[in-house]
Amino acid sequence: MTSRRRSDSFPRLRDDLGAVAVDGDIVVYDATAETAHVLSGGAVAVWLALENETGPRDVTARVAEIVGEDPRVIADEVDDAVRSFRERGFLVADSGA
């Protein structure tokens, strides 16, 4: 069995965020910033993929599977969602360990 390892530059979700699914959306609570965010639609799929996948291609493939689209069609949307998560402070760079 091959061990999958994240790229050194691939972001991961912060461990200290709280997240709960509510009616198909995900509510994210950032205790540090004392803010709550509601994710819906494709952002939910990206969140779920970031929880489990190891690299950008894996995330895009998983999102494509969740939403039933071709990965090539949604790649830009996935990138936009990851960028939005970074801007909201949801992500940290993975140490690669």
Image (tube, rainbow, N blue to C red):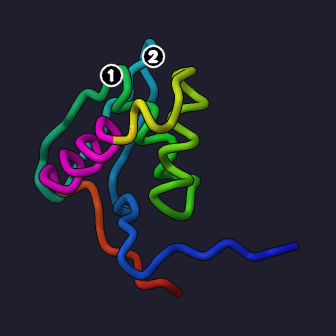
Of pointers 1 and 2, the one earlier in the residue sequence: 2
| 67 shown above or below 74 | above
Side of 65 where 45 appears, left or right: left
Between the residue at mark 1 and the residue at mark 2, the CA separation in whole angstroms equals 7 Å
Quarter of the figure with residue 66: top right
Q: Nearer the viewer, residue 38 or 61?
A: 61
| Residue depicted at 42% across the width and 42% down the height | 47
Q: Is residue 41 above or below residue 53?
A: above
Give SS at disc 2.
loop
Residue occupying the point 48% across, 44% down: 60
Residue segment shown in magenta: 76-88
Residue 24's disc is 2
What amino acid is at disc 2? Gly
Given the image, on which type of amino acid does mark 1 rest? Ser
- The structure residue drawn at horizontal position 56% and vertical position 56%, both measured from the top left corner, is 53
Q: Secondary structure at mark 1?
A: loop
Q: Quick check: marks 1 and 2 in contact, CB under 8 Å? A: yes
Tell whether 30 sits left or right of 41: left
In the image: residue 24, left or right of residue 17: right
Residue marked by disc 1:
40
Residue lying farthest top?
Answer: 23
Disc sitting over residue 64 in the figure:
none
Image location (x, y in percent) of residue 93? 32, 74
Residues 27 and 50: in front is 50
The residue closer to the viewer here, 28 or 67, is 67
- Dominant secondary structure, magenta: helix
Q: Quadrant of the N terminus?
A: bottom right
